[in-house]
Image: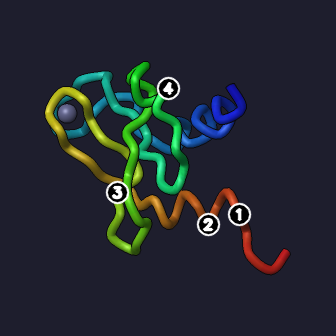
Amino acid sequence: MGSNAWIRWLATHSPAACPRCGARRVVPIVYGLRDGDAEAQGLVRLGGALDASSPAWNCLACGGSGGSALEVRLRAEPSGS
Ligand SMILES: [Zn+2]
């Protein structure tokens, strides 16, 4: 599955454990990628449109979320270089 490398990279920008409940069930939220398989496996949550307030990760245990998806994306796709 081609998106696995991208998902693994995204996961490096999510905390290993949820800062809210401590569960190690934090997954990156993927925007603009239709990957029902990855979601079904519990590897990612699918987000909608990406905007400045979109969180980067989601805790499957408590539903908490955090980080900045936009910031992570900018690191992945540096503009102008
Ligand atoms: Zn949590």
Q: Which residue is mark 3?
A: 55
**Of residues 77 and 33, which is closer to you in this image?**
33
Residue 57: x and y in percent read 37, 45
Q: Of the residues shown, which amino acid type is indicated by label 3?
A: Pro
Q: Which residue is mark 2?
A: 74
Q: Earlier in the sequence, mark 4 or mark 3?
A: 4
Whether residue 37 sits left or right of residue 59 in the image: it is right
Ligand 1 image position (quadrant)? top left
Q: Of the residues shown, which amino acid type is indicated by label 4?
A: Asp
Residue 81: x and y in percent read 85, 74
Instruction: Give the residue displayed 24% in from the left and 23% down from the top.
Output: 23
Give the Cα distance between marks 1 and 4. Answer: 24 Å
Q: Extreme bottom residue here?
A: 80
Q: Earlier in the sequence, mark 4 or mark 2?
A: 4
> What is the quadrant of residue 61 in the picture?
top left
Q: Which residue is mark 1?
A: 77
Q: How many marks?
A: 4
Q: Reply above or below: 61 against 72.
A: above
- Say if mark 2 contacts mark 1, CB within 8 Å: yes
Q: Which residue is mark 4?
A: 37
